Structures are given as structure tokens and as C-alpha cells.
Image (cartoon, rainbow, N blue to C red):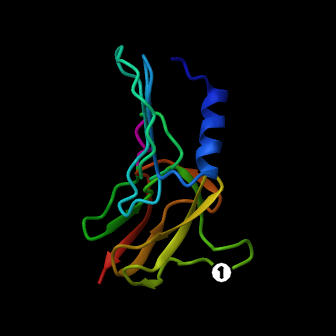
Amino acid sequence: MQLDHDQLQQLLALLGESDIQEFCLEGEDFRLEVRRNLPSAAPVSLVQAPTAPAAPVAPVAAASVPSPSAPPPPAAAARSDLQAISAPMVGTFYRSPAPGDPAFVEVGSRITAGQPVCILEAMKLMNELESEISGEVVEILVENGTPVEFGQVLMRIKPG
């Protein structure tokens, strides 16, 4: 089975419009996994594999936009007293809930665990990213409206 770029785009569009939470597709030279809405925001991967038998397609549970197995862009050197908030998926980073609205957080803002800190748009779905830690926002490393990679550091927080 071959899957070209156009077919992949069509497949992702159909999945984005469906209630399917997890999707896996294997071909002779690839494996595609798409997951969305998992608490841990599991990564999506497209992996080139040696010849493998095709597996049936089965819907299950989570979805982001697939990304090639490329490492996220290198992050600036981190201070040991700071914790990073990283992108749990590939998408577009937005600092506010809507254009013209104030940003969720600014440098110097105090945040609590569970508080939304940004939005990541993936496949036309707006996903609020909530902080897992409480503390002070020390750095915001991504510009509004910028595409981000899975695992890319978005912000650094000083716990407390």
C-alpha cells in the first residue's frame, strides 16, 4: 500500500471531522498513528519501517497532526530552577483565545496548575493547553501564530 501526500491530507481531513480518537494505518513501508484528546497528549508518528504486512485499520482513542520523525528545534539553554511547558502536539501556537483578546499569560504572570496558558490549533481544532505546574511565567519562547513541533518548549515556569 502506498500513501501519497494528497491522500494523507484527505485522510487527516476526514479524521478531523470524525469522532475517531485513535487511528492506526500500516503499509509495506510506513506506519501512521493519529491520536487526539488524550490526557497526556500522546505524540503522533509517521515511521518508515522495513517491509511489514498490512494491518487492518481500527479506530480507537487521540489526534494531532502527524509529523515526520524529526527532532524538535533546539531549545535555548535552560536554567535548572525552571520547568518547561512543551507542545504535546504539532500545531499553531496562539497566546490568546481569540484575535484581539488579551493573552492567557504574560512574562511575570502567576499561574496555577490547570490554568490555560495558550491554544494549539491542529487540524482546525483549537486545543487549550493547561499548565501542569503552578508558578511564575519567566519566558515565552514562541511568537503568536507560529507553527510548533511536538515536544518544542513553549514557555519556562519558575515553580512556586
Q: Residue at x 61, y 77 (%)?
A: 103
Q: Residues within 10 Å of mark 1 (few under 14, many from 20)?
A: few
Where residue 152 appears, as percent x and y from the top left, is 44, 52
Q: Nearer the viewer, residue 50 or 73?
A: 50
Q: Residue at x 50, y 40 (%)?
A: 66
In the rendered picture of this protein, how many numbered marks are placed on residues?
1
Magenta segment, which residues?
A: 70-74
User: Which SS type dominates the magenta stretch?
Assistant: loop
- Quick one: which residue is furthest to the top in this view? 51
Q: Residue at x 49, y 76 (%)?
A: 116
| Left-right relation of 154 to 9 | left
Q: Nearer the viewer, residue 21 or 157?
A: 21
Q: Which quadrant would the C terminus be assigned to in this image?
A: bottom left
Residue 35 in view, yes or no: no
Give amino acid for label 1. Pro
Where residue 42 appears, as percent x and y from the top left, is 38, 52
| Left-right relation of 121 to 114 | right
Q: Specify whether residue 71 is painted magenta.
A: yes
Q: Nearer the viewer, residue 149 or 107?
A: 149
Residue 101 in view, yes or no: yes
Q: Specify whether residue 1 is painted magenta.
A: no
- Quick one: which residue is furthest to the left in this view? 80
Where residue 104 appears, as percent x and y from the top left, is 56, 78
Element type where label 1 sits in the image:
loop
- Mark 1 lies on residue: 102
| Left-right relation of 159 to 8 | left
Q: Is residue 82 placed above or below 26 in the rendered structure?
A: below
- Quadrant hosting residue 13: top right
